[in-house]
Each structure stands twice: as structure tokens, then as C-alpha cells.
Image: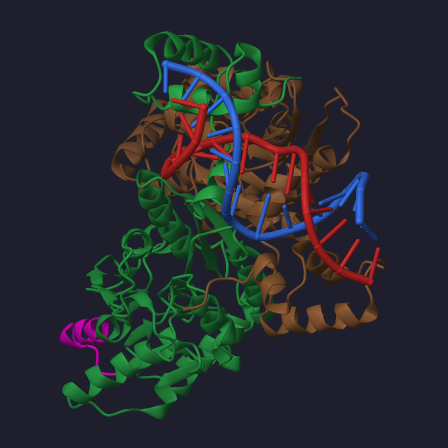
Chain colours: A brown, B green, C blue, D red
Amino acid sequence: MKRKITLKQIARELDVSISTVSKALRNSPEISEDTKQKVQAFAKLYNYRPNNIALSLKNRKTNTIAILIPEIVHHFFSKVIRGVELVANKRGYNVIVGLSNESFSKEVINMEMLANGSIDGFILSISKETQQLQDYHHFNETMSQGMPIVMFDRVVNEINCDKVIVDDFKGAKNAVNKLISNGCKHIGLITTNDYVSVGKLRTQGYLEALKENKMNLEADLILKLEDNMDYEVHLDALESEIEGLFKANEKIDGIFAVNELYALSAMKVARKMGHNIPDNIQVIGFTNGVLSKHATPSLSTVSQHAQQMGETAADLLINRLENDSEEEIYQTVVIETNLIERESTK
Amino acid sequence: MKRKITLKQIARELDVSISTVSKALRNSPEISEDTKQKVQAFAKLYNYRPNNIALSLKNRKTNTIAILIPEIVHHFFSKVIRGVELVANKRGYNVIVGLSNESFSKEVINMEMLANGSIDGFILSISKETQQLQDYHHFNETMSQGMPIVMFDRVVNEINCDKVIVDDFKGAKNAVNKLISNGCKHIGLITTNDYVSVGKLRTQGYLEALKENKMNLEADLILKLEDNMDYEVHLDALESEIEGLFKANEKIDGIFAVNELYALSAMKVARKMGHNIPDNIQVIGFTNGVLSKHATPSLSTVSQHAQQMGETAADLLINRLENDSEEEIYQTVVIETNLIERESTK
DNA sequence: TTGTACGCGTTATCAG
DNA sequence: CTGATAACGCGTACAA
């Protein structure tokens, strides 16, 4: 097993100095054609490639960025990664993935590990626990060391950095407006607790749509679910909560759910209770994942353009890394949502 | 904005030498309590952390591994990543993710980029194009440089390295056996072209089950689909292919599909054609993703234990990295599948 | 008890 | 045209 070859070895082998080899390989005009030929041929033969780590150390630049997300087994986040990867690779960067698993401490540890020279910047979406604790010291520390951060989707207003978000408020409002214009009179909302920023915004969108249409806010139409419970595992619990919602208000004829799973479960429960979708009850979800597309009936949904979010975030980060101008002006890019109409609405 | 602090800066500030600082921070007995206290306090104040890149260069070890997969927006692969991440982090490694996007050249480029010192080893599942071309030079080159590779799921027999696979053959056989014991007499197979190794093995499992049960092989019950077509985008095309299968042999009463999407589409088409599932036609898929669980009816499926595959792969790789014994003995770990019975079978 | 020197692999600068 | 030297940040064997 032969180790990777280095400049030093080539130099020794060819009986020239290291710097001559280095220059020859970079086609420096300082070096004679003769030596260049010799060195380049030898390097090619042994498949020489400069060592990235040494370059990183010398240039104080790793050409690697990290994306830190709460959960990877999730259509939305994996699509964001794909977007980040796409742009990063195109612009010559590698991507390290870190998972916080929705835990504050894992988020902090991960950031500290990576911030010590391993990467040039972060793209991240904060964990639920961090949202609850509202402890953002690790973001501030990282940024004060000159390492840029781009937040996406779940962002925090208190931190001054580049951000990529979806217009959750407007997306939700549009969805509910659609239900209303489709004739729904009593629209149920299935959402999360307010500390989940996106849940809160989508809830506000729902409320705004009702208000604009001068519809009454009926308290028993709103179901707020504890989001730190893993409903993917405890589907029964989720479904019985939703069943409660349907029973609490028999007049329900529309559902807006802040994510795919809630929407799908609502359809399932509704059908089980004898309702017909979309004739009897219309449903719209948020996040355009695989489930929505392949459900029966397929689910109308607010698409977040996850991949585009990832691409935008990567561009923002790399632009900042490559623009030496230490701008203190941060931007927030809002990705427009759009409503994908499928079979669950008329 | 303050840069990250280095040993050199601390040394200058405290008017001692760099090595004194280094030793003091590592609690060397060579250093007096006094100096230690002083240095450690200062370091803590300025939140000193050793630079990973410098350590990597010095130790010729990055403590980073790469996972190279064909596609990330895919339940199976993201679960594998989760498993890899889990183990890697626990054992002190970071994870770089590379996407080949099913392309041979992207796979090669990615490997070359990362192999130049950025990482200590690879975990990978080869792209479809690589399977077709059967060009494996990049794997050999990487390994001959002393960089270990662990392949998972889509592996190549010609390469001698650690592997983690699922028993595709047995999993498929069991699934088909289940259909047979459930009373199916004419079982359709929806599979891919044979160059996809897992597709081939699953097809063989189907054939074996028929043979064992002395059932006739009916050619018009087998649908081989071109897998380099993106059926996720062209669902219609997929469905019309499947409709053709049903029409070709009206006696079909069971379907075994080599992936989730094929199985789901089969159910959809069957229902559209007036069949009842599972009374009339029973269906089993491969890969236990979100779709199977949330479909209506929910899909019985062969579970691959993706996360466990990732964990095993990571352990194999890190073991090899940390065992200086340059063993030339490679192992192949077979992860047992199991059949998850849901509503699509009796 | 502290400091010096070296090496990891590379490039840039300057001297020959 | 070529080579020696310094530097990136760290750890450690050895010298003082």
C-alpha cells in the first residue's frame, strides 16, 4: 500500500528542491521547460494531488461548509441538503452534515466541534429545544469569531445573520383563503405549540385569512399539538387527538394542517368517520413531501421549495465567504410558497 | 470581530513560549502549577480550542469520514446517513456527505476531491451509472492509497473491501413465500433491469420462491422497468406500464415489487381497475419507507433496517481506521431483513 | 520547570 | 532558472 505522494517525495526522487517541484507543477514561468516536463510527467505518473489539509492550513480556508439540521430523515431537510450540496459543489466546496436531533446540547457540541477550523461557515436550522430554551449564545460566539452563519426555515430574529425563510404567514393565509373560496365555512386548524416559529406563523396566517373574510374564530376548531412528541412513532395518539377535533365541532368542512403528517392523519380520521374528501371535507397541508403526492386522495399542499432554499442559503454563505468586504448588512431572502392543488380540494 | 485565538497568541500575551502553553493546557506534569493556572485561566477566558486542521495535518488523521450516496432525497439513504452520523459522532468523527446523483463522473470527482487528505475513509453506495459501466478504477485507486472503503447496499463483488448488505435474495424469497402461503396463485413481479444489483437479487428471490413451491413461471407476470428513468417525476408512465402488466395477465392475485414506489403505484392502478386490496390482490414492497406506512391501505413491506446498515458501516470503517493492524481480511456483514405485515396482505 | 527545534505539506518570498 | 526559508497551528522529543 503506497501512501499519497507528496512534493517532498517527488523532490527527493528527482533530485531537485521542493519549491522547484511546487513551481513546476503550477506552471510557473520561473522554471525551465525541461524541468517542468520532467516534474509534471513524474507527478502525473504517481497521480500527485496537493494535500487539502495542508492547503487549508496555509490558506486559512477549508473550502468546506457545514449544514446543521435537526433531523435528516425528513423530506424537507434532505431536499435542502440537496440544494446546498448542488451549489456548494459547483462553487468548489464540500459539505459536512451535522444532526442536532432536535437537541440543544447536540447543536452546541456540533457547532463547537466544527467551528475549530474544520469549516468556513454554517448553514443551519435550529432545533426545537433551542427554540424553547431561547438560548442563542452559541450562534453569537460563532459569529463573533468571524464565522458566518446562514439560517434557514427555523430562524431566530434575535440573531443578526443572513436568513432564508419561507413566507409561512402568507402561505398559510393563501391556503386558508383557498379553502374559503372553495366554500368551506368551518375550517379546522391543526397546528403546533407557538414556540415553534413556523407553527406560530402558519397559525397567524390562518387567523388572518379568517379575519379578512369576516369569518368567526371558533376556538373548538383549533387543535394545538405538543410538537416535542414523536407522532411519527405514536400515530395512534395523533389520530385520537384529531378525532377529538372532529367530534368537538361537527360542522367542520375544511382542514388546514401545518405539516404533511397532520394533514394525512386528518384525512385518514375523516374517512374513518365516514366523511368524503373532498366533497365533504377539504384538506390542505404544508410542506410538499412524498406523502402528499402519493396519498389517496393526493393532498393539496403549500410547497416550500426546499431545494431552492438550500441553494439560496449556500449562495448567500459562499458569497459572504468570498467577498472580503466585511459587510455587516445581512439579508433575509424570502422564498415564495405556492399552493399545489391535488385531489383533497375541489 | 476577533479571530480564533491560537497558542502563539496566548504565548505572546503571557510572555511564555508556545510549547509551555501547549503543555500547560494538556496538563503536563512538566509545568508548574502556577503557570498552568495562569495559562488555563487565560485560555478559558478567550475560549481557546485547538485548530482541527493543524491537528489533522500533524496527526495525518482528519477524524472525518465521507458517505457517498447516489441520492439524498430518499428515505432509505437518509436513514443510512443517520446511522452513520450517530456512530461516527459517538466515536469522535465528523461526516461529510457527497452525492453522486447516480452519475459515474460525479462519483469519481467526489472521491478524488475528498481522498486528497480531507477524510480518513469512505462509506459508499455506488451509482447506477457505475453499475452499468462496471468501471471501478476509482475504488481501486483509493484503496491502494491506503484509504479504506466500506460499501453498503449496492456493492460490487469485484472490489475487495468491507461491505454491509441486506439479504436481498432471501428477503424477496420470504416475501413471495408469504404471498404464496396467503393463497396467491399468480404473483406478478415489478422489478428493474438486471444491472441494478439489488434488483437482480430480488428478482432471483422471486424466482426461487416460485420454484420451491413448484409454481409455474409465467413470463407475462414479470415487468422489468428501465430504472434510469425518473418515475418519481413521470408517475403516469410508471402507472401505464403497470396497467399493462395487469391487463397482460388477468389472473394476477399478488404483486411483489422491488421498491416502495412500484408497490404503491401497483396498488393505485389495481384499485383504479376495480380490484380490492388485499381481498382480491395482495401486495408486498421492498424498503420500509414513509410511503409504506402511510399509504391506504398501508403496504406490507420488506424492511431493510437502513439505520442499522449505516451504523454497521460506520463501525466497520472506524474499526479499520483505528486498528493499525493492516488486515487484508475484509468482511461482509449481512443485515437480516424482516417482513412488516400491514393492510396490503391478508 | 521552561524553551528550542522539528515535522506534518504546501506556497510565497527572497536570495543565489 | 533554482533553492533555501518562513509561515500556517500544533504537539513533542530533547536541550537548557
Q: Which residues are magenta?
A: B173-186
When the figure is inspected, residue B43 is found, relative to residue A124, above or below; the finding is above
Indicate whether residue B175 is drawn in magenta: yes
Toward which corner of the image does residue A84 lie, by quadrant? top right
When the figure is inspected, residue A218 is found, relative to residue A277, above or below; the finding is above
- Say which of B306 and B236 sits in front: B306
Relative to residue B262, is residue B53 drawn left or right?
Answer: right
Q: Residue furthest right?
A: A29
Q: Is residue B38 visible?
A: yes
Q: Position of residue A193 (x, y in %)?
A: 42, 20
- Say which of B300 and B83 sits in front: B83
Q: Position of residue B33 (x, y in %)?
A: 33, 10
Toward which corner of the image does residue B343 lie, by quadrant? bottom left
Q: Quadrant of the N terminus of chain B?
A: top right
Residue drawn where x is 50% and y is 76% of the image: B137
Q: Position of residue A53 (x, y in %)?
A: 56, 46
Q: Quadrant of the C terminus of chain B?
A: bottom left
